[in-house]
Image (cartoon, helix red, strand yellow):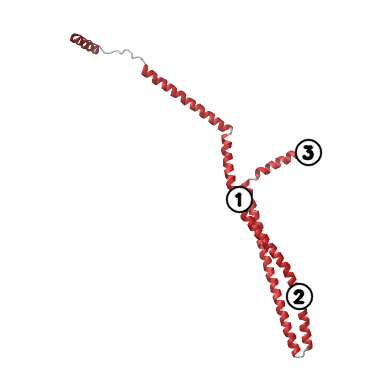
């Protein structure tokens, strides 16, 4: 039982590790923005439908009110012409229309409440969207800076960079060694004793003559 639990724990840990690697901040932020845009579009569409329904309901109310006014005029004309049956029919329909009007006006209040709720939701979503857009710009900038800094520091502290630095130091040491050897050769060439040089017989004879002439002059 303990082994299965350990395997389950390891599997969950590996799965979470994979998820963490997949959750790239830049990609996830853009995805959240897209999801919020979709929600905002749905809310705006619902608000549009709600406004249309509200306007249509108000149109029904205007029609009923107009019918009530028409029945009042018909009632008055029927009474003036002493047409009792027509007057009663006009009164009956007017009363029915007035009840209908009351129900429609009560419904309209509920519709307007729903409309106001949708408007508030759309406004809130727009404010959230604007806020996240501003935060996204800052977050993407921070993410880019952090990733660049991580790559640089990772390069500086990696084994490869250490090998590069050590190799560079060896090359500096070699150059220094070559410079030392060149300096030593230069010093020896300046301070070595002059070696005897062999001249031709003709030069030696002229040299002796010149030397004897100088001795006679002395």
Element type where label 2 sits in the image:
helix
Specify the label residue 61 is tagged with: none
Lateral position of residue 20 relative to residue 217, left or right: right
Residue situated furthest bottom in the rendering: 81
Q: Name the residue rendered at 43%, 21% in the picture.
A: 181
Q: Name the residue rendered at 54%, 28% in the picture.
A: 166
x then y, percent, for residue 40: 65, 58
What quarter of the picture does the N terminus occupy? top right
The image quarter containing residue 62 is: bottom right
Of the two numbered discs 3 and 2 in the rendering, the one whose residue sits closer to the viewer: 2
Q: Name the residue rendered at 45%, 24% in the picture.
A: 178
Distance from disc 3 to disc 2, alpha carbons, whole Å, reads 67 Å
Residue situated furthest right in the rendering: 1
Distance from disc 1 to disc 3, alpha carbons, whole Å, reads 41 Å
Q: Name the residue tied to disc 3.
A: 5
Q: Name the residue tied to disc 1.
A: 136
- Counting every numbered tag in the picture gives 3
Element type where label 1 sits in the image:
helix
Element type where label 3 sits in the image:
helix
Tag 3: Cα neighbours inside 10 Å, few (<14), some, or many (≥20)?
few
Lateral position of residue 126 relative to residue 181, left or right: right
The image quarter containing residue 73 is: bottom right
* Tags 2 and 1 touching, CB below 8 Å: no
Q: Name the residue tied to disc 2.
A: 100
| Relative height, residue 85 to residue 159 (above, below) | below
């Amino acid at each position: 039982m303990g082994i299965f639990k350990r395997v389950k724990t390891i599997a969950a840990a590996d799965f979470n590790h994979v998820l963490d690697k997949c959750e790239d901040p830049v990609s996830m932020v853009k995805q959240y923005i897209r999801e919020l845009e979709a929600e905002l579009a749905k809310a705006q569409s619902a608000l549009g439908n709600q406004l249309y329904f509200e306007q249509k309901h108000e149109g029904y109310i205007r029609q009923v009110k107009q019918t009530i006014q028409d029945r009042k005029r018909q009632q008055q004309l029927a009474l003036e012409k002493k047409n009792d049956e027509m007057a009663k029919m006009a009164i009956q329909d007017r009363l029915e229309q007035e009840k209908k009007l009351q129900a429609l006006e009560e419904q309209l209040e509920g519709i307007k409440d729903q409309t106001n709720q949708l408007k508030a939701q759309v406004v809130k979503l727009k404010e959230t969207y604007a806020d996240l857009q501003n935060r996204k710009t800052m977050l993407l900038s921070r993410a880019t800076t952090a990733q660049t800094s991580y790559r640089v520091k990772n390069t500086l502290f990696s084994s490869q960079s250490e090998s590069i630095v050590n190799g560079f130091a060896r090359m500096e040491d070699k150059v220094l060694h070559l410079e030392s050897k060149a300096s030593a050769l230069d010093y020896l060439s300046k301070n070595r004793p002059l070696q005897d040089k062999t001249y031709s017989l003709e030069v030696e004879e002229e040299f002796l003559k010149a030397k004897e002439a100088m001795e006679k002059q002395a």
